[in-house]
């Protein structure tokens, strides 16, 4: 099971700088909320709606 606290801490420590990053953060938060409500682990199918994400590096 993913460590949701760790994921949320990462998002909080790395605020989005660009519009694309804002959309990515929002999408990740929506996915986390859905998983927590359903008490299920996210699968690759859950990420299919996001399409290809390019040009974003996470350090």
Image: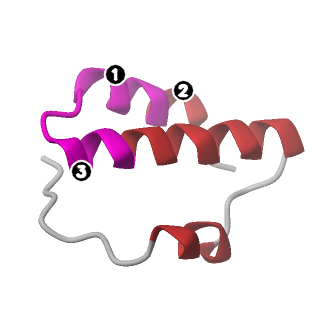
3 vs 1, front mark: 3
Q: Give how far apart the Cα atoms at labels 3 and 1 are.
A: 16 Å
Q: Position of residue 12 (x, y in %)?
A: 34, 22
Disc with the residue nearer the chain's start (3 vs 1): 1
Q: Where is residue 35 in the image (x, y as percent from the top left)?
A: 74, 46
Q: Name the residue under label 2.
A: 5
- Chief secondary structure of the magenta span? helix
* Residue 5 covered by magenta stretch: no
Q: Is residue 33 above or below residue 44?
A: above
Color theme of the render: secondary structure
Q: Mark 1 points at which residue?
A: 12
Disc with the residue nearer the chain's start (2 vs 3): 2
Between 4 and 19, which is closer to the camera in this rendering?
19
Secondary structure beneath label 3: helix
Disc with the residue nearer the chain's start (2 vs 1): 2
The segment highlighted magenta reads 7-24
Local crowd size for mark 1, using a 10 Å CA cut-off: few (<14), some (14–19), many (≥20): few
Which residue is drawn at the image coordinates 54% and 26% (left, top)?
5
Q: Give how far apart the Cα atoms at labels 2 and 1 are.
A: 10 Å
The label shown at residue 20 is 3
């Amino acid at each position: 099971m993913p460590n949701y606290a760790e994921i949320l801490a990462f998002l909080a420590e790395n605020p989005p700088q660009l519009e694309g990053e804002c959309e990515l953060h929002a999408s990740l938060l929506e996915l986390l909320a859905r998983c927590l409500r359903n008490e299920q682990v996210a699968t690759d199918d859950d990420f299919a709606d996001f399409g290809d994400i390019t040009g974003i590096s996470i350090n």
